[in-house]
Amino acid sequence: MLPTTITEEVRHYLQKAPPAIVHTCCELCGGSWLVTIAHQDRYGLPLQFVMCRQCGLITLNPRWGQESYNKFYTDYYRPLVAEWSGGKTPTANNVRIWFQKMAQATALAHYLPASPRVVDIGGGDGFLAEYLRDQYGAEVVIVEPNAREAQEAVAKGFDVIVDVFEHGHLEPASFDLVVMLRTVDHLMHASETLAKVRRILKPRGVMLVDGVDYYRRMAFCGDPTQPLKIDHCYYFSPETLPVLMKKCGLPPMISDVTVLPGQVVVLAQAGEPTDISNDGFDCLLGAEYRYYEWERLANRPGFVSKPGDFTRALQAELVWLKHKISRRWHRHQ
C-alpha cells in the first residue's frame, strides 16, 4: 500500500534509510549517563531521544547521516510541518519580527560595522537575508541545503552555498556576523559547526543564534514529546547552549530566555576555545532541575501546566536539589 500522508511517507523513508550516527557519550560534557526520554517524536515517528543526566543536553540518538537528511529537507520537511500544523507555517514577516526582537535585545547593531559581511546559515529562500540587506546594508551569503529554496534565494540576487555549512567553503576571518535563526537545533554536529563559525568570523565578529528551550516548551504544553521533532538533532537549555558556544571559542556576551518564548537567544563574540570544566556544577544543577520537571510531567498523563508553573513548582525543590547535587559533584572531584 502506498503512503497516503506526508508523515507516512517519512515513516516509509525512515525504514529505507536506517540511522547512521550513534553516540555513546554526551557531545557536550562527555558524560555516559544517557537516559532515554522518548521513543517517538511529535509526528509519531519511531525515534529515540536521550538526555544527558550530567549536563542536560538532549539529542536525537541514533540519527540519520547527512545525505539522508539532505533528501529529507528537500523532499519532506516543509510539507511535513505544514501537514502537522494544518498549513500554518512561519511567514517571512514572522522571521523578520523574531530577528528584530533578538537584535534589539542583544544590541546587535552596536557590534556591527557599516555594510557588514554576513553569513545566514539555514537561510532558506532569503527572507531574512533581504531584511539584513535592506536594514543593515549587509552583503549576505546564504548557506542552505534545500535545493529548491536555494534557487529562490539565488533569484533574489544572493550568493548561495547549496549545501550544509560544514561542507561549504568560506574564507577564514572574513565575516562580521553569522546568523543562525531557528537552525542550531537542526545541526548534525553542533561542536564542529560552531568551531567553523569561529574560524570564519573576523577577530571582533559576532554570532547571533537561538535554540529551542525544550524544558520550557515541555512545561508550557505539558507533553514531553510535543517539542521533539525528527529534524531537531539537539535540544538545548539556558545552561547548555552558552556552555557549548564557550567551548567552541564563541564566548557568550548576552544570553536571554525572555525575548522569544520557548527559545534561548545568545549573542557571542569570536574568542578562544575554553575549558568548560568549571561550568560543570551549573550544568549539573540545571540537568537535575530540568530532569525533575520532565519526570514530573512524564509520570502525570494529561497534566498541562500553565505559564509560570515550571518555575513555581520547582522553586520549593531547588534548595534540596542543590544540596543533593553538591554532594554528588564534590564526591566525583
Image (spheres, grey):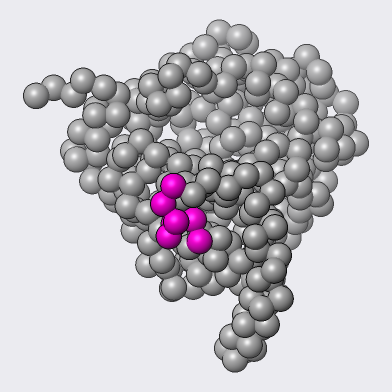
Which residue is found at the position 84% from the left and 33% from the top? 104
Residue sticking out furthest to the bottom? 331
Which residue is found at the position 61% from the left and 72% from the top? 284
Residue sticking out furthest to the left? 1
Numbered marks: total: 0
Asked if residue 213 shows in the view, the reply is: no
Quadrant of the image containing the C terminus: bottom right
User: In the rendering, at what x and y percent does residue 2 appear?
Assistant: 13, 22
Residue sticking out furthest to the right? 110
Which residue is found at the position 64% from the left and 30% from the top? 120
Asked if residue 10 shows in the view, the reply is: yes
Which residue is found at the position 24% from the left and 29% from the top? 8
User: In the rendering, at what x and y percent does residue 74 appear?
Assistant: 38, 24
User: In the rendering, at what x and y percent does residue 254 appear?
Assistant: 80, 49
Question: In the picture shown, does residue 282 fall above or below 147?
Answer: below
Q: Relative to the observer, which residue lies in front, 21 or 139?
A: 21
Question: In the picture shown, does residue 222 fall above or below 156?
Answer: below
Is 64 positioned to the left or the right of 121 in the image?
A: left
Q: Relative to the observer, which residue lies in front, 69 or 315?
A: 315
Q: Quadrant of residue 93?
A: top right
User: In the rendering, at what x and y percent does residue 36 appear?
Assistant: 38, 61
Q: Relative to the observer, which residue lies in front, 35 or 323?
A: 323
Question: In the picture shown, does residue 154 fall above or below 24?
Answer: above
Question: In the picture shown, does residue 97 fall above or below 21?
Answer: above
Q: Which range is magenta?
A: 296-302
Residue sticking out furthest to the top? 155
Is 306 positioned to the left or the right of 294 in the image?
A: right
The answer to whether residue 163 is magenta is: no
Q: Quadrant of residue 116?
A: top right
Quadrant of the image containing the N terminus: top left
